Amino acid sequence: VRRALTWTEIPLRTEVLREAARTLAPYYGKVFGTLTATGMAAIEVGLEWVGVRPEDEVVVPSECCYLVPAAIRRLGAVPVFALVDDRLTLDPLEIHRVLTVRTRAVLAVHHLGLPCPVRALRMATPTEIPIIEDAAQAFDLRSEGAAVGSTADIVVTSFGEGKPLSLMGGGGVFASQQLLENAMDRHTAAAREGTTLPRSSALHPRAVEDLEAHIKAAHELIARRRKAVARLTPLLHRAGLRPWRGRLYDSPSWHRLPVWAQDAAARENALMAVSAEKVVQLPHATSVPQLMHFKEHTIVLSPQTFEELLLIRLDDHERLEEWACDVRRRGHIDE
Ligand SMILES: Cc1ncc(COP(=O)(O)O)c(C=O)c1O
């Protein structure tokens, strides 16, 4: 009896994850998906799914989480860094400069929850090159009115701690093809006897308990951030801090709110205000393409720096209020 139970647990676990992936997929504009142990693993599965092999080139923005190009390197492929524009996402006008005969995919990252113009990227990229949308820092985001997943071939995401939709770890790959549901299969006879090697691990079924509550929390989080940005925007302008501005019908999910200090005094005020250490984040000192992991394998057009950029964290309401009040006081801004 014990043996029979052990065997029946395996399809049950697969079924729980399959159902969870089908529940999550519409939030990423797709119907089917597979869940992975991390967001980085989701990128690896996604790249392989669209046919990326060792030595192939994958276009990636010069500004993004370093785990994105790291996933490309893990497959033995080559990250090709393309310049971002002043909205901090891939510039569709730059794409033609980085495409080669070895390009196998473009990774469109919604960096900091800011909409990457996926539709314009699709138009700027030959149709045989798939676009993979990375929505790890995004939720309920729209780019020029288009929802996540509406243009891209596949969507990858992370459910890690601190992500808008957090399951305290994990990742997902979403597509329109049902076949993707088998990408993490390593228990069935077909997987055992197939030609592709099994993968290391899927998301644990426990992580998806209370999935509806996690999704509701993500919606509430994004609504709070959007309200905070609406409240802050006039104050920031008056304090000499220019907040990020999107295209028409862009709807960011604001993992951070980027602001550009107009002069040294405005920057100093922002950094010296009460609670600044919890609210204001400086960009990393070393840009992603310059990191040791990528130096020898990467192709970069020209390094970009964003020295005057400050990143505002919106999730600690109390500290954000303290900071905003002090910025106002320091700048002697009249309401
Ligand atoms: C845009 C982006 N993609 C992928 C990842 C990787 O996700 P994970 O940490 O779950 O591996 C991250 C970050 O952590 C990320 O910010």
Image (tube, rainbow, N blue to C red):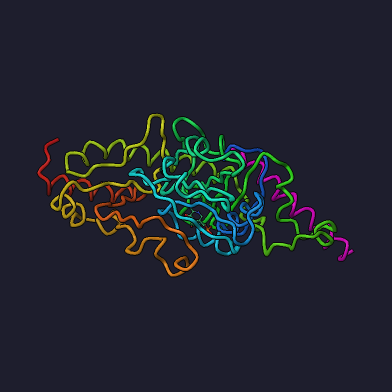
Which residue is painted at 40% across and 55% down in the image? 301
> Where residue 315 appears, x then y in whole percent?
37, 49
Marks counted in the figure total 0
> Where residue 195 appears, x then y in whole percent?
79, 60
Based on the displayed image, in which of its 4 quarters is residue 184 positioned? bottom right
Image quadrant containing the N terminus? bottom right
Based on the displayed image, in which of its 4 quarters is residue 39 positioned? bottom right
Image quadrant containing the C terminus? top left
Examine the structure image and report whether residue 175 is included in the region drawn in magenta: no
Examine the structure image and report whether residue 22 is included in the region drawn in magenta: yes
Q: Over which residues does the magenta segment extend?
A: 1-26
Tell whether 154 sits left or right of 196.
Answer: left
Residue toward you, 244 or 205: 244
Residue toward you, 248 or 1: 248
> Where residue 55 appears, x then y in whole percent?
59, 61
- The residue most toward the left is 332
State the predominant SS element of the stretch in magenta: helix
Which residue is painted at 42% across and 40% down in the image? 93
> Where residue 139 appears, x then y in whole percent?
49, 42
Which residue is painted at 60% across and 50% down in the image? 172
The relative height of residue 225 versus residue 296 in the rendered view (above or below) is above
Which residue is painted at 17% across and 43% down in the image? 239
